[in-house]
C-alpha cells in the first residue's frame, strides 16, 4: 500500500487565486465603504469616534440582515445566480443616493486644538495599535471558524448552521461597535485595555459552555414538534441562543476597531486614511486567521487547542497594551492586566478537553429527540451506550472530526462529524454489496476505483478478487485513513495485500 496525496499547498494556492479572481474586485471596492462614509459624515473631530462607530454598527447590522436573508430565503428561493444578480443591483441604488448626497453643500469640519507630540513616539504608538488590529482580525476569524465547526457537531452540518453562527457573530459585533458610539469621549487606552481584559475573561468562560451546546440544542429541538412547517421557529430559537452566548465575548471584539480608530485619528491625516489603514490591517489579520486558525491549524491541533491558541492571542494583546502604554495607564489598571494575563495564561494550559462523547455519536439525529428518556444523561446513554462504549480513536482535521467507538451492540463504528459512517456489525452486509453488486455485471475487472475509504470493507473485498490487479481508493479525511488499522479484521486483513492498492488523499474529482 502506498499513500498518494495531492499537493495540499498547491491546491490551496490555486483555490485562493481563483477566489481572488472571482470576488477580488467587488470585495476590494467594498473595502472603501467605511473610510469614505467616515470622511464624509464626520463634522467634529472630537466626536468622530461616535460617527464612525455608528457607521460601522449600521454597516454590520446590514450584514446581519443580509446573511439571514441570503442563507434562509434568497438562495433557497431564487438560487445562487439570481440572488447575486438582484443583490448586485442594490449597488446602483446606493450609487444613486451617493450621487444625490454629492450635490448637497459641503459640511463644515470642526477641529480641536491639540498638543504637538513627539513624532517617534507617535509612530511607535501607531504601529503598536496596527499590530493589535492585526491580531484582532486573526483571532476573531479563528473563533468564528471554531464556533461554526462546533455548532455543526452540535446541531448538524448544514448551510443553515453556517448562516446561524455567522449571523449571530455579526449581530454581536454590531452591538459592540454601536456601544462605542454611546461614549461621549475616549481618552487614552483605558477603554481598549478594559475591553481586551473583559474579552479574555468572557472567552475563558465561553470555553466551558461549548460542551453543553449539544444538550441545549437538543432541548430546543424537543420543544418544537419536528415538522417542516416548524423549522423557522427552530432556527429562530437556535439563533437567539447563539446570540445570547456570543453577545458579550464577540460584542467586545466589535468594540476594538472603533476604539483603535479613536486612538489613531489625527487632524493632520484624513479620517478616511486612518480608517482605511486600521481596517485593511485588520482584514489582513482576518485572512490569516481564517486560513491558519480556521483551516491549517487543525492539521496539528484539536479544536480545544485552537480555542486555547485564540485565547492566548487575546491575552498577548492585553499584555502588549499594558506594557507598551504603561505611561498612559494608572498602576491598578496596569498591574491588574498583568495579573489577569498570568492567571488566565496558566489556566489555558490546564483547560480540560471537551468530552468527545458529547459530539460523537451526534445528538441531532432523529433517535435523540424521539426518545422517551427522562433526562439528558439517559438520552446520551441511549445514543452512545456510554457506560459500555470505549473511544479507540479521535482526530480533528481541517474538514472533519473522525472518531472510532467500540460499542457492544454495533461493534467498532466509524463516525465522521458525529454521524456513523461504517460499522462492523450493523451495516456490514450492505457495505459488502456496495462493492459486490456493480462487479456482478462486469465480466472481467483488472482495475477498480473506489471513492471513500470508510472502514475499508469495500477495499478488502476488492483486493481479494484474483483478476483485480490494482485498486485505487480516494479519501479526503486524513483521520479516516489513520483509523484504517482499527478495522483490519472487518477489512478482511487487507494490509496483507498492500501491493494491490493505493490510497489517494484528496478530492476524487481532482484526482480523476
Image (cartoon, rainbow, N blue to C red):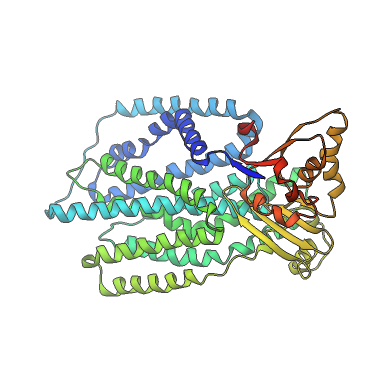
Measured from the top left, where is residue 392 in percent x and y?
70, 63
Above or below, comparing residue 356 to residue 257 in the picture: below
Which is nearer the eye, 498 or 115? 498
Which is nearer the eye, 3 or 374? 3
For residue 78, side relative to residue 313 (left or right): right
Residue under the point 82% across and 38% down: 466
Measured from the top left, where is residue 445 in percent x and y?
80, 30
Which is nearer the eye, 96 or 386? 386
Measured from the top left, where is residue 185 in percent x and y?
28, 57
Quarter of the rendering containing residue 437: top right
Q: Is residue 455 visible?
A: no
Measured from the top left, where is residue 74 in percent x and y?
61, 33
Quarter of the rendering containing residue 160: top right
For residue 366, side relative to residue 305 (left or right): right
Q: Is residue 468 visible?
A: yes
Q: Quadrant of the N terminus?
A: top right
For residue 318, side relative to residue 452 (left or right): left
Q: Quadrant of the C terminus?
A: top right
Which is nearer the eye, 360 or 132? 360
Amino acid at each position: 500500500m502506498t499513500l498518494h496525496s495531492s499537493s495540499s499547498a498547491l491546491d490551496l494556492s490555486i483555490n485562493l487565486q481563483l477566489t481572488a479572481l472571482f470576488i477580488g474586485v467587488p470585495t476590494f471596492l467594498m473595502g472603501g465603504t467605511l473610510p469614505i462614509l467616515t470622511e464624509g459624515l464626520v463634522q467634529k473631530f472630537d466626536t468622530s469616534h461616535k460617527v464612525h462607530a455608528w457607521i460601522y454598527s449600521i454597516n454590520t447590522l446590514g450584514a446581519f440582515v443580509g446573511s439571514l436573508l441570503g442563507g434562509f430565503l434568497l438562495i433557497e428561493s431564487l438560487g445562487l445566480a439570481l440572488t447575486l444578480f438582484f443583490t448586485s443591483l442594490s449597488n446602483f441604488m446606493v450609487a444613486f443616493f451617493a450621487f444625490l448626497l454629492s450635490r448637497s453643500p459641503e459640511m463644515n469640519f470642526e477641529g480641536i486644538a491639540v498638543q504637538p507630540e513627539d513624532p517617534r513616539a507617535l509612530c511607535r504608538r501607531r504601529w503598536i495599535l496596527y499590530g493589535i488590529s492585526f491580531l484582532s482580525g486573526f483571532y476573531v476569524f479563528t473563533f468564528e471558524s471554531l464556533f461554526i465547526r462546533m455548532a455543526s457537531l452540535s446541531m448538524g452540518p448544514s448551510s443553515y448552521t453556517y448562516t446561524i453562527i455567522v449571523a449571530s457573530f455579526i449581530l454581536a459585533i454590531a452591538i459592540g461597535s454601536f456601544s462605542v458610539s454611546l461614549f461621549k469621549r475616549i481618552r487614552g487606552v483605558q477603554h481598549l485595555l478594559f475591553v481586551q481584559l473583559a474579552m479574555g475573561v468572557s472567552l475563558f468562560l465561553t470555553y466551558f459552555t461549548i460542551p453543553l451546546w449539544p444538550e441545549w440544542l437538543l432541548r430546543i429541538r424537543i420543544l418544537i414538534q419536528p415538522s417542516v412547517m416548524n423549522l423557522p421557529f427552530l432556527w429562530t430559537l437556535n439563533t437567539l441562543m447563539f446570540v445570547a452566548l456570543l453577545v458579550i465575548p464577540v460584542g467586545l471584539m466589535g468594540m476594538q476597531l472603533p476604539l483603535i480608530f479613536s486612538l489613531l485619528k489625527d487632524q493632520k491625516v484624513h479620517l478616511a486614511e486612518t480608517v482605511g489603514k486600521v481596517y485593511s490591517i485588520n482584514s489582513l489579520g482576518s485572512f490569516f486567521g481564517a486560513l491558519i486558525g480556521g483551516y491549517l491549524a487543525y492539521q496539528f491541533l484539536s479544536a480545544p487547542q485552537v480555542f486555547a491558541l485564540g485565547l492566548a492571542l487575546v491575552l498577548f494583546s492585553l499584555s502588549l497594551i499594558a506594557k507598551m502604554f504603561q505611561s498612559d495607564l494608572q498602576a491598578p489598571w496596569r498591574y491588574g492586566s498583568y495579573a489577569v494575563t498570568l492567571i488566565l495564561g496558566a489556566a489555558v494550559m490546564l483547560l480540560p478537553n471537551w468530552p468527545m462523547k458529547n459530539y460523537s455519536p451526534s445528538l441531532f439525529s432523529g433517535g435523540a429527540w424521539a426518545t422517551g428518556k427522562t433526562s439528558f444523561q439517559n438520552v446520551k446513554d441511549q445514543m452512545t451506550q456510554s457506560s459500555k462504549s470505549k473511544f479507540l480513536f479521535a482526530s480533528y482535521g481541517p474538514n472533519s472530526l473522525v472518531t472510532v467507538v467500540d460499542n457492544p451492540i454495533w461493534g467498532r463504528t466509524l463516525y465522521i462529524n458525529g454521524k456513523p459512517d461504517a460499522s462492523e456489525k450493523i451495516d456490514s452486509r450492505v457495505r459488502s454489496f456496495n462493492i459486490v453488486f456493480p462487479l456482478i455485471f462486469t465480466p472481467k475487472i483488472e482495475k477498480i476505483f473506489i471513492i471513500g475509504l470508510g472502514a475499508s470493507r469495500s477495499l478488502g473485498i476488492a483486493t481479494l478478487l484474483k483478476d483485480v490487479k490494482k485498486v485505487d481508493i480516494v479519501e479526503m479525511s486524513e483521520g479516516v485513513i489513520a483509523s484504517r488499522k482499527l478495522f483490519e479484521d472487518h477489512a478482511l486483513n487487507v494490509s496483507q495485500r498492500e501491493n494491490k492498492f493505493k490510497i489517494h488523499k484528496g478530492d476524487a474529482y481532482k484526482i480523476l
